[in-house]
Each structure stands twice: as C-alpha cells, then as structure tokens.
Amino acid sequence: MKPRADDRAGEGPAIALRDLAKSYGRVHAVRGITFDVARGEIFGFLGLNGAGKTTTIRMLVDLLRPSRGSATLFGIDCQKQSRQARALVGYMPGELGLYSDMTGIELLDLLAHLSGTRVDTAYRLKLVDTLELPHADLRRSLREYSTGMKRKLGLVQALQADPPLLILDEPTEGLDPLVQQALNEILFELRARGRTIFMSSHVLSEVERLCDRIGMIRNGEIVLLSTVEEARRRGGRMVRVHFARPVERVALPPGMTLVSHTPERWNVRVEREIGDLLPLLATLPVRDLEIVEPALEDVLRSFYREVQP
Amino acid sequence: MSGLLPLVGHSLRRRRGLLAALSLMLIVFQIFMILTARNYEQTGGFRQIAALMPQFMAQWTNMMGASFTGFVLFGYSHPLVQLFLVAMAISISTEPLGEIETKFVDLMMARPIRRTTAINRTLIVLVVATVIAVGSMLVATFGGLRLLAPATARPPQPRVIVSLAANLALLVLAWGGIALAIASCARRRATAGAATGFLAFATFVLDYAGKFWEAVKPISRISPFHYFDPFTMIGGRPLSTTDVAALAMMFAVSAAIAGVVYVWRDL
C-alpha cells in the first residue's frame, strides 16, 4: 500500500510564499506576496474579484508558473518538486470544469486514481452523506447535476483522499445554508485532526466563523495579515451612550471618535481602553451604556473600500 | 507512469462513440468501393473509364480508377477518407488544450501526475484510435474482397493493401503530432483545430500542385501528404522507407515540441 500523503509531508509551515509574483505582460496579477500558513490552521484568503486570489492558488498547485519568487508546501517547492507538493494537496477550484458525459462516481474514481494515494471508500461515502449528495445521484450523468450538486462533488473530490492540506477556492459558493453548515463542521473536524485548510472567499461572515487567520489581497498585494481577533480589534469597539437628558457635545479623549450623536445618544468608536472614557462619562447624566464588539465584516469592508477610486 | 492508464481509459471511454461511428463509416465506404468496383468489373465499366481518362491523369494515378484493384484501393487515398482521419487526429490531439479551456485540467493536474503524462496519454489515444480506424478499413477490405469480389477480377495483393494502410496510418499520426504541437502553443481549442485544419488543407493543395508544377515541387516536400503516394504503391512500388521515416520524424518531432511546451506553459 502506498504511504498516506501526510506521512510524506516535510518540515516547515503548511504554506510559505516568498515574494511570489505573477505577471501577464504589463498586467501584474500578483505582486510579490510573502506570508506563511501554519500547520493545522484554517486560513482565509480574502479579496475582491480579480484581486489575485485564484492566481495565487493556481500557482500553489503548479497550474501557473510564477514570474518570480517561490511557494512551498510543507517545505516542498511547488514548482521544483511539484509532484511531491501536489501529493499533499486536496484542491477544489473555483470554477469546476466537468465532463457532462461522466457520472459523479466515475469522476470521483478517476480523480482518486490520479491522487496517488489510497482513497478510503467509507470516508468518501461519509463525506457524500454529510454534504447531502444522494448516493443515487452519483450514478447520474453530470449534465443532470445542479450547480449546488456539482459544488458538493467538487468538495468530495478534494477531500476524499484526506490530504494534509486543503486548498479550497470559494468552497461555499452555490451551497445552501444547511450544506454550508455541514461543510463548516467537516472543516472544523479536519482542523481538529491537524489538517491545514487554505480557503479563499469573499463571504466575510463565513470567514469570521471559520478561520483562525486571514490574509487580504488587493491589487495583487497583501494588505492585511492577522488573526481574526486582531483584525476585529482594528475596527475598535463601539460604545453607545444613552443619556437621561439631552447633553451638549464635548471633546473626547484621544483614540475615541464620535461617530454619530443626538442630544440623547452618542455612538463613540473606542480604539483604546474603554476606561479612558469613563471619567468623562461620570460627569454626564448617563442612563445606559452599550458596548458593541466590532464585526469583522466592517473592518474588512474598510480594507475593500480603500481600493475604490 | 502514474496516472497514465486511468487517463488513457478515460479518454478512450469518452471517444468510444465517435470512434465507433468513424470506423463504421470507413467500413461502409470500403464495402461501397468494392461493390462499385464489382459492378464496373461485371459491366465492363472499367474499359469505358480507361478510354475517357485524360493522359496526365492516367499517368499520375497509374490508371487507378480503371481497374478493379485500383478502384478498391482508391478507398485508402480518397480525399474524404483522409479528411475524416485527419479530423479525428485533430480532435484527439487538441484534447489537452480542451482540458485547459474547460478547466478540467485544474482537477486533473492538481494531482501528483507529471505534465508529460497528459501528452503521453494523448499520443497513446491517438495511436490506438488510428489503429482502430485504419484496422477497420483493412478488415472491411479483406472481408469485402473475400465475399464480394467477382471471380473474373484480379484482387489487390495483401502486401499492397497493408502497405497503403500503414502509410495512411503514419500520415494520420503525423497530423496528430502536428495538431498536438499547435494545440500546446495555443489558448483556444477551436483556434488550434482551425489552424491545423487550414494547414492540412494548404499542404494538401501544395502537394497536389507539386505533382503537376515543377516550380512548386521542391516546396511540396514540406507537406506531410507528399510522403503518402498511394498511386505509385498501387503501381507496385513497395512502402518507401523515406516516406515512413519522414512521417515518423514529423510525428516524433511535433510530439516532442508539444511535450516541451506543455511542460513549461501556464495551464
């Protein structure tokens, strides 16, 4: 029996990109990005359409050749030792190119043969069940599949060999909320077993729910690289102050911004300790205080917006 | 060799309908040629054809259309037969480009298989399909002659039939290799197919012109069709080693170019 893929994983982070760039003539799709993805984490790769997410991903699986720089998977160079690197990956492309005259099971079998590792049929069936893909449908021609069914099949083919690294390009696109939830559970279970998941997405709520760390690419450059918690903190907390009677606007301590206000209510963004605000509030007729944790979506949207002219 | 056999099986499975239809058509065509030749033989039609045939045509074709043997073997050099076989070769050889265009390559090549495996797969499928198609013609010719040839007719020698089939198969393989090389450099399957089709037509005309026009003759050597001369073979010339070597060289060189380009290109 051939060794399982994770037995062959070398040293180093699951993914390491060093000055990775891809140009098409004068068009710079990816402009020298550098970051690591640690083993066993779920990493969200964010960006608007055309930002360079898919180009980066396709360089990781050696479908595209970088113009400069390097990428390694578990210390194995994606270009120089491409086959060894790809043996460690389960990849779901954003755009699934399927032959409509094949059946679902034919596709899974063909790709399992090409994976070079033994595929556990019981595990594959478990995935099929969890993603609510009826067994009978696997015998049907792919031309009869809906978009959602094709996406589910795409996920099964990526996961079926249980590789140490999953690279998923927009994995929840086209899935209904129940299947999205099922997929989340599968990904959490995989992380618990030490698998690394690198997923691109522009669904911010999904990234917030799933990911340990995020990287944001904009115009081919990494503009944010942090844990989800850190990113959320960047947005600052919002403090809503309700007054017992109307108050005049007063100057706020440094690091605090009055986002909106009425005589009865202030919305204050606090980027530092909330304690700095309390001495001021003690002098005012405060009826109630509400501290709202920032949503990651708001923070990330601000990064997205910076790209707009 | 990892991944080669599943890919060959997959590709052949997908083409089995097309291959069966083409083979059936070629079989029917060969049987039709034998039946027509039998009819001419029995009604004295070949004498009329010989009388009507212009001198230059008679010299060029070795009176091919004016004898039972020549007419039966015309099934191996008929432009329609060559057209269908070359079209089959183009269709098979542009498969790697089709996979890039449809993005199936993302599923296939993200697996630990060599890029050359995709090219080797196509070459194997091309050889298998050519053997099946030309083999069907051979079966139809030998079977048809056995069952349908009139007693008065002198049937073609088996050696000549096999030589013609082998030369035709090599011509198809050469075009398959050329199509594969063009497809490896192109971005769209339709573009690669059309470019190869146009090149095949242009070189067919060039070879034809070279037979009658001395000025064009030296240039016509670049045409793969130059190395498939059925009329002289029907006239008794054995399979030329020069023709075999030239077509085999075209196949090998273009396949090698395809392999090198495919390994280096973005998919």
Image (tube, helix red, strand yellow):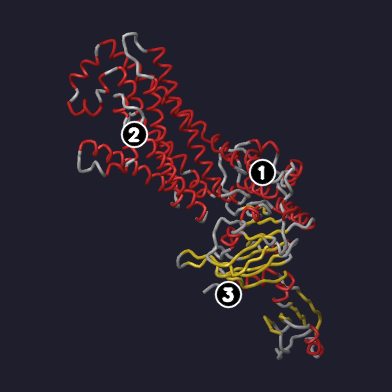
Q: Amino acid at mark 1?
A: Ala
Residue A129, quarter of picture: top right
Q: Chain of mark 1?
A: A
- Determine crowd level at label 3: few under 14, some 14-19, many 20+ residues with C-alpha closer than 10 A: few
Pointer 3 residue: A306
State the residue lying farthest toward the top.
B151
Please provide percent x and percent y for residue A81.
62, 57
Q: Secondary structure at mark 2?
A: loop
Q: Answer above or below: position of A74 versus A124.
A: below
How far across and how far down the image is residue A168, in percent? Answer: 65, 56
Front disc: 2 or 3:
2
Q: Amino acid at mark 2?
A: Phe
Q: Residues within 10 Å of mark 1 (few under 14, many from 20)?
A: many
Residue B241 lies in quadrant: top left
| Left or right of A104 in this view: B97 | left
Q: Which element is circle 1 on? A: helix
> Looking at the picture, which amino acid does disc 3 mark?
Glu
Residue A202 locus on image (x, y percent): 63, 62
Q: Which of the two residues, B258 or A252, is positioned nearer the viewer here?
A: B258
In space, the residues marked 2 and 3 are separated at their CA atoms by: 66 Å
Q: Is residue A47 above or below residue A8?
A: below
Q: Which residue is mark 2?
A: B228
Residue B152 located left or right of residue A162: left
